[in-house]
Structure formats: structure tokens, C-alpha cells
Amino acid sequence: MDAVTLLQVASAFLLNLAFSWLAGAWCARRWMHANGASRHAFEPALRRLDMAAAGLGVVSGAAGLLAATAIMGDVGLREACPMFRVMLTDTDYGRAGCVVVLAMAALLLLRWRGAASRAGDAGAMLALGIFTLTRASMGHAGEEGYWSVALAAEAMHYAAIGIWTGAVLVSGWFALEDARIGASGMGMGIGAQDAYLHRMSQAALVAVLAIVVTGVYSAWRRVGTPEHLLHTSYGAILLAKVALVMAAIALGGYNKLAGLPAASRSHRGLLRVRAVLRLESVVLLGALLAASTLITLQPPTAQ
């Protein structure tokens, strides 16, 4: 893997990670509030993490555009620098990439200002929606236009994997920490986190269903035949992504069927749920890396 391809994969992975965290954090705020948690208990720390994620999104988005410039010009990264401005202003890909970076910059500004109002939340949701649609249009699905079924499926798939991954990340590594999730005056008593876990589980279930439906549709369009799935690099990486997603679904299923009931009965059960969520987050990050690698390859049906 040369430097250009490495930058392309790394920037795509980090951009996907930033989006996932921000989408998960947006949802987690709603769930923690519904659970009765005090905003002062989680908002300052979560806002700093959101700012870090949005800043990472801005940097990785710009780095991805530089890698795209090098690929379009068939040159190295250093030689691509003088061509960078022209790519941004004179190509559809460059203009879309600018929108993606600006959406991340808007999220950074909103969190920097500490906007916790309804207007601030609506602005963050709008920025996330614009990012999702624009980012989806920069892939293979965007070649069919903004009003195509392929782009709608890609945008839905991208949003669903972001919400699922983000919800798992934020819940496992932030929200379920002691004293953050408990209702006001309840601390971390037994059952204090039930409302949060119920909403998180329901959102994850909807996201998984959307991922499966849109993933099967997109895979069928891009791979075409079982032979392509088994005998091409694209198919091999896609199978690895599917395997990781299935492993994450299995972990999520365990939590839903066994972990959540145990968490409502004891603090030890909650700790088990948190541990499984952290393991699930690692598996989902592997799936994000596989998805980021796929963008460097031409689908078999396009060859």
C-alpha cells in the first residue's frame, strides 16, 4: 500500500469514526435526558469529546481530499499540493468534499459554543444530515445522481452504521460510566439506567435492520455474482466486513436478551453490559476499517 492509498484509507476511517461518535453523542444526549440524568453531569465532558471528534472530522476530511487529488492526477502527495485548489473548485467530488468538511466545521462550532438548546440540537442534526447525504454521494452510489435509489440506500446505510457504531461507542466508553447515567438523586442504584438502555437497544435494532436491508441491496449491485464475491479483493474485504458486522450483531443480541435484564437487577449486570458494548465497539471499528478500505477498490460490476 503506497502513501496515497494509506492516506485515503486512514482519512476515510477517521472521518467515519468522527461521524459515528457525533451521531451517537447526539442520540445519547436524548437518552440520558430521558433517563433523568442531570445535563451538568455529562454535558461538559461530552461536549469536549464532540469537539475533538468534529476537529478530527475536519482534518481527516481535508486529508482525504488531498489523497483524492493525488489519485485524480496520478501523482504523489507532494506533487498533488499545487493541484489541490483546482480539484476543490473545478470537480464535483471536490465541491462535495468541501461540503463535508464545512458540515464538520459547523458541528465543531456548535459544540464550541456549548449550544445545548433545541435550536443548537436542531442545527447539529441538520449538519449531520447534510454530511450523511453528501458523503454518500461521493461514493459509487453518487454516480447515479441525487434522486436515485442507489444513493438513498447508501445514505441510509451510512447513517445507520454511524448511529449504531456511535451509540455503542458513546454508551460503552462514556454514558455508562458511574454517576453519568443515573437519574437525578438516584446515583447508580439498581435499575437507574433502564430507560437509557431501552432506548439505546431500540435504536440499535432499527439501525441494524436498516443496515442489513440496504447492505444486501448495495452488495448485490456492486458485486453482481457469487464468483465476484469469492474471487476478487473487493469481495474478500466485503466478506470480512459482513463477518465483523455479524459478530457485532451477535454481541448486541446477547446484551439485548441477557445483558439488559441482568443490568436491571444488579450493578454487576450493568458492568457486564458495558464490557460487552466495549467489545462490540472494537468489532464495529474493524467493520468501519473494512468499509474504508473498500473505497480504494473498484466494485466488480464497475470493471
Image: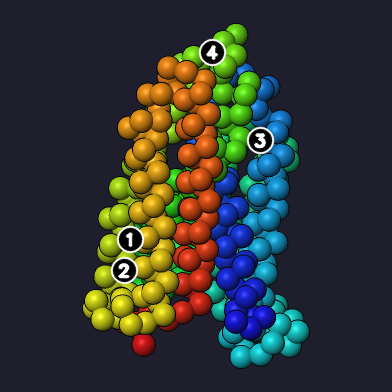
- Disc 2 residue type (three-letter): Ala
Identify the residue at image location x=64%, y=47%: 107
Q: Say which quarter of the image contains residue 80.
A: bottom right
- Disc 4 secondary structure class: loop
Q: Give the residue furthest to the front.
A: 268
Q: Nearer the viewer, mark 4 or mark 1?
A: 4
Disc 1 and disc 3: Cα gap in Å?
A: 31 Å
SS of the residue under disc 1: helix
Residue 46 tag number: 3
Return the disc, 4 or 1, that comes first in the chain's sequence: 4
Task: Say which residue appears at 53% left-offset and 29% top-offset.
Answer: 271
Q: Quadrant of the N terminus?
A: bottom right
**How dense is the environment of label 3, judged by Cα within 10 Å: few (below 14), some, or many (20 and up)?**
many
Q: Earlier in the sequence, mark 4 or mark 3?
A: 3
Q: Which mark is residue 189?
A: 4
Q: In the figure, 170 relative to 156: above or below?
A: above
As drawn, is 274 to the left or to the right of 249?
right
Q: Which mark is residue 215?
A: 1
Per the model, the C-alpha gap separating discs 4 and 3 is 22 Å
Q: What whole-number distance in Å separates the C-alpha atoms at marks 1 and 2?
A: 6 Å
**Mark 2 and mark 1 in contact (Cβ < 8 Å)?**
yes
Residue 123 appears in view:
no
Identify the element where label 3 is drawn. Answer: helix
User: Where in the figure is residue 136, as x and y percent of width and height?
Assistant: 45, 63
Q: Is residue 168 visible?
A: yes
Where is residue 222? Give x, y as percent.
32, 74
* Residue on which disc 2 sits: 219
Residue type for callout 4: Gly
- Proximity of marks 3 and 2: CB atoms separated by less than 8 Å: no
- Tell whether 92 sits left or right of 243: right
Outermost residue toward the top?
A: 185
Query: Residue 207 appears in which quarter of the rendering?
Result: top left
